Amino acid sequence: MDLLIFWDARAPSGIQAALSRELEVLLPLTPAVCESHFVVTGYIPSRRQTDASVLLDSLDLYKKRTGISHPILLVVSEDLCRSGDEYLFGLSRESTGSAVVSTARLENEYYGLPEDDEDLIDRLVKESAHEVGHLLGLRHCRNSECIMYNPLVLDDINRQKRWFCPECRVFTG
Ligand SMILES: [Zn+2]
Ligand SMILES: [Zn+2]
């Protein structure tokens, strides 16, 4: 099964290949990075954030309209939220095979630290593998080093390893 990675034009460039390569190692899927023609929706001006649920709704509609049945991981730079959640690193919908991750809070810049592509790639790999893990049916894991641990803050992602614990790995083949 293939995983389509839609890369929004505003998302940081130059790291697509690295993400794709790392995901291929971690997941039982073959990733393919595509230039995204999907228009990012769900912007909430009052919050200066994008509603990730609305975004997934329109991604689902896009999939239906274009007949794409592969799981899609959309990478955006918009800061994501959802009603009840102040912010989200990403969101997935297993029933339709759609997921989105945001680079906004994965970048050092957001925290006033010097830019570092290696940090960004490392976090993006883990957060992406986490959301795709959900698409493969995985639930959250209590092991804080496992990719399926539910990260609430950046430190949680930094603590995670590029690793599915044995319990979670069973499901990813
Ligand atoms: Zn999760
Ligand atoms: Zn686990």
Image (cartoon, grey):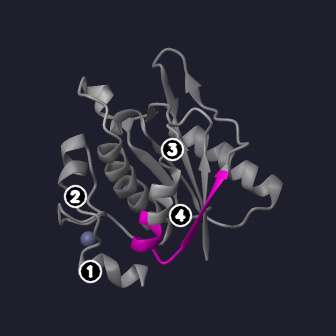
* Closer mark to the observer between disc 3 and disc 2: 3
Using the image as rendered, state which of residue 116 and residue 93 is in the foreground: 116
Amino acid type indicated by mark 4: Glu
Disc nearer the start of the sequence (1/3): 3
The local crowd at label 1, few if under 14, some if 14 to 19, many if 20 or more residues have their Cα within 10 Å, is few
Residue in the image at 18% along x and 66% along y: 143
Disc nearer the start of the sequence (4/2): 4
Proximity of marks 1 and 2: CB atoms separated by less than 8 Å: no
Q: Kindly identify which numbered label has been placed on residue 160.
A: 2
Q: Is residue 82 above or below residue 139?
A: above
Q: Which residue has dot 4 on it?
A: 94
Give the position of the N terminus as an image quadrant: bottom right
Q: Secondary structure at mark 4?
A: loop
Residue 65 in view here: yes
Q: Which residue has dot 3 on it?
A: 14
* Closer mark to the observer between disc 1 and disc 3: 3
Q: Which residue has dot 1 on it?
A: 167
Q: Write down the quadrant of residue 119 in the picture.
A: top left
Disc nearer the start of the sequence (1/2): 2
Disc nearer the start of the sequence (1/4): 4
Amino acid type indicated by mark 2: Gln
The local crowd at label 2, few if under 14, some if 14 to 19, many if 20 or more residues have their Cα within 10 Å, is many
Residue 153 in view here: no
Reply yes or no: does residue 150 show up in magenta.
no
Query: Looking at the picture, how far across and down is residue 25, in whole percent?
Result: 41, 73
Q: Which residues are magenta?
A: 22-34
Q: Secondary structure at mark 1?
A: helix
